Image (cartoon, rainbow, N blue to C red):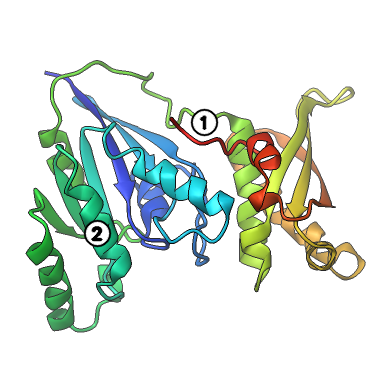
Amino acid sequence: MFKSGFVTIIGRPNSGKSTFLNNVLGKKITITSDKPQTTRNNISGIYTTEHSQIVFIDTPGIHKPQHKLGELMTKAAINTLNRVDLIMYMVDSDQYFGKGDQFIINLLENVKVPVFLIVNKVDLVKDIVPLKHYIDKFKQRYNFKGIFTVSALRGDNLNKLLVDIENELEEGPKYYPDNQVTDHPERFIISELIREKVLHLTREEIPHSVMVLIEYIKKDDVNPNLLNIHASIIVERSSQKGIIIGKGGSMIKEIGTLARKDILYLLGTKVYLDLHCKVIKNWRNKDFHLRNFGYEEEL
């Protein structure tokens, strides 16, 4: 019997949802960083075995929005709860139970599918007693179908988790071909890989206000084995543009160098990456630009 189903991964920002998905798939389809709210879209990752196909949905961290973009991100995550067969609620073992967790548990009270509590980053735990108290607080507030302690980074206990997820799914069709790992277009993944390098290399206000727009992707006229990619890094202020460019263009050059390596690995072909930086003031609060950059409110 072949099983299939959809599993959403929810949680507060920086709980390790994207790291989990990349590890399970063995391929980088969603970016990671130590910055809050790194993931801005719902991203599907397709895990296929001989006996099952699990479509994971990596969601933005659920948080109190500070702008229109934040509102769309949080709604995108919440809207998955009643559209899936199982929910993974991922929490950081190094954090404390707070208002954000209670908010998510309140949301879970209205769902009718199994919910797994995934306590991540246990590789960083030095004292098991506080961890047990932390887990108890969740157990007191919600009747989880299963509770798992994992390390999404190292892969600890992920195989057991995958087995238990498969056991919860019902018989179903294979939605995607065996070799497909995401339903997102390459253009989207490329833009995210570039944004990831900005997150890693910059500090302060830059990570939250940056967006990457792919202007075009086309084969080179002279060398058919070379792909030309033109992309714009969008920021909200001129001072931010100066940081992105760097002294003598040093920062944008480093961003391009690191991003090109990941894009080469993704596409398996040589890449010429041409990066520019543009200023669009307050784009995170403007509906026109949010729609233009692919952030549309789901019905």
Is any part of residue 26 visible from this angle? no
Labels 1, 2: front one: 1
Q: Is residue 145 above or below residue 14?
A: above
The residue furthest right is: 248
> Could you say which disc has been placed on residue 296 in the image?
none
Q: Position of residue 228 (x, y in %)?
A: 80, 33
Disc 1: CA contacts within 10 A as few (<14), some (14-19) or many (>=20): few
- Closer-to-camera residue (117/104): 104
Q: Residue at left 76%, top 61%? A: 254
The image quadrant where one finds the C terminus is: top left
The residue under the point 43% across, 50% down is: 74
In-front residue for pair 43/182: 43
Measured as percent of width and height from the top left, residue 19 is found at: 40, 54
In the image, residue 198 sits, relative to residue 299, either above or below, namely below
Query: Which of the two labelled residues, at mark 1 and mark 2, occupies the earlier sequence position?
Result: 2
Asked if residue 144 is positioned above or below residue 132 in the image, the reply reads above
Residue 18 placed where, x, y %?
Answer: 42, 51
| Residue on which the image places disc 1 | 184
Residue found at x 24% / y 28%: 5
Query: Quick check: 36 left or right of 163?
Result: right
The local secondary structure at tag 1 comes to loop
Residue displayed at 25% across by 50% down: 107
The label shown at residue 156 is 2
- Looking at the rendered image, the quarter that the N terminus falls into is top left
Amino acid type indicated by mark 1:
His
Res 80 seen here: yes
Q: Quadrant of residue 166?
A: top left
- Mark 1 → mark 2, Cα distance in angstroms: 27 Å
Secondary structure category for the residue under label 2: loop
Q: How many marks?
A: 2
Q: Amino acid at mark 2?
A: Asp
